[in-house]
Image (cartoon, grey):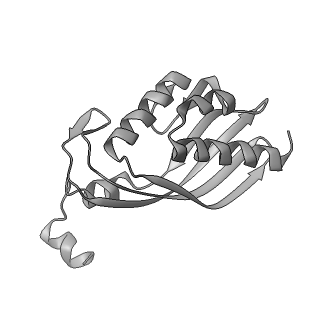
Amino acid sequence: MSLEENKAIVSKVVEALNKRDLALLDEFVAPDFVDHTMQLRGLDSFKRFETNFIKSFPDYSETVEDIIAEGDKVWVHFKVTGTHTGEWNFFGITFAPTGKKITETAVQMYRIVNGKGVENLQVSNPLGLLIQLGAVEYTEKGKKLFP
């Protein structure tokens, strides 16, 4: 596959998530997909994770800021926004809805094989997300350092 085709596959995954059309993921994500960051194994596990996120942040949107491909890898820098209006389970911890808006930026690396994403690794700031939701608060020293 060409670099442009690989980038298009990742863009279509983002588009499917933004449209809430998880059935489209069958077309672009391999059945044995592995997400190293979220510790997901398999396409069904990925869909369950995304379903949970959509229920928790029903207005969420991913915006691609930049996308780069080399070999079988595609790196995408994106921004996620949404409002926490549903119960959210994050790494086994359940958070009641807060009504708070979140914004997070992240970089993901997808590996593409035979036209499908087979693995993913993400660099993000989950602590920043938990701070935005009020689940984690700065100490007095932290408030002075990060006003």
> Considering only vertical position in the picture, is 88 above or below 98?
above
Q: Nearer the viewer, residue 66 or 21?
A: 21
Q: How many marks?
A: 0
Rendering coords of residue 52 (x, y %): 37, 35
> Considering only vertical position in the picture, is 112 above or below 58?
above
Residue in the image at 69% along x and 38% along y: 111
Describe residue 104's horizontal placement relative to residue 89 as left or right: right
Residue at the limit of the structure toward the right, as seen here = 2
Asked which quadrant contains residue 83, the reply is bottom left
Asked which quadrant contains residue 63, the reply is bottom right
Rendering coords of residue 73 (x, y %): 72, 44
Residue in the image at 18% along x and 43% along y: 96
Rendering coords of residue 80 (x, y %): 46, 56
Asked which quadrant contains residue 22, the reply is top right
Describe residue 23's horizontal placement relative to residue 11 as left or right: left
Rendering coords of residue 126 (x, y %): 36, 51
In the picture, the quarter occupied by the N terminus is top right
> Considering only vertical position in the picture, is 110 above or below 136?
above
Describe residue 116's horizontal placement relative to residue 144 as left or right: right
In the picture, the quarter occupied by the C terminus is bottom left
Q: Nearer the viewer, residue 57 or 5?
A: 57
Residue at the limit of the structure toward the left, as seen here = 140
Residue in the image at 57% along x and 29% along y: 23
